Image (cartoon, rainbow, N blue to C red):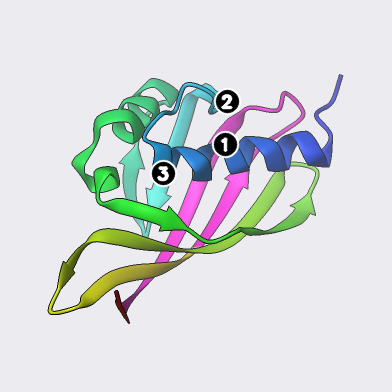
Amino acid sequence: MSASDEERIAAAQAYIDALVSHDAAKVPFAPGCTRIEVGLKTGFSGNHLRRSLNRGLQYRVIQATTMPEFTVVDANTIHAKFDLVTKPSLLGRKVGAHIDETFSIPADGLIHHIRAGIRPFVTVS
């Protein structure tokens, strides 16, 4: 049975939710899932990504995300655009980022690869 577009979007949403909740138990990672962030490999397996989301300092600073805008690119690819805001502030300003993430989620419904583009911005807290 092949995962529907809605199921593949739900898998990507589970990942985005885990960025904020720091609980990746419901993220359907394939065992060999990898993540590339601005050209650098930051995820080496599904278990590595799950541990990073649960306990990684790089994710602990994330406070919130906006509602993602999802696009079904093809039968294996979901694209998500959203913003995130971090917890720390300095002089009344917070750092955020515009995020473009492309998820490879084939028929099995598991996330096999994530490619992330990040454009930082500063906001008034």
In this picture, residue 51 sits left or right of residue 19: left
Where in the figure is residue 22, as x and y percent of width and height? 36, 35
Where in the figure is residue 87, as x and y percent of width and height? 25, 57
Q: Which residue is mark 2?
A: 28
Given the current orientation, which residue lies at the most extreme left position?
91
- Pointer 3 or 2: first along the chain: 3
Q: What amino acid is at disc 2?
A: Pro
Q: State the residue at coordinates (54%, 63%).
A: 82
Q: State the residue at coordinates (68%, 38%).
A: 10
Res. 19 mark: 3
Q: Residues within 10 Å of mark 2 (few under 14, many from 20)?
A: many
- Pointer 3 or 1: first along the chain: 1
Magenta stretch, residue numbers: 100-122
Magenta span: predominant SS is strand
Which quarter of the figure has residue 39? bottom left
Where in the figure is residue 13, as x and y percent of width and height? 60, 43
Q: What amino acid is at disc 3?
A: Leu
Give yes or no for contact between labels 3 and 1 (Cβ–Cβ under 8 Å).
no
- Pointer 2 or 1: first along the chain: 1
Give yes or no for contact between labels 2 and 1 (Cβ–Cβ under 8 Å).
yes
Secondary structure beneath label 3: helix
3D distance between C-alphas at marks 3 and 2: 14 Å
3D distance between C-alphas at marks 2 and 1: 8 Å
3D distance between C-alphas at marks 3 and 1: 9 Å
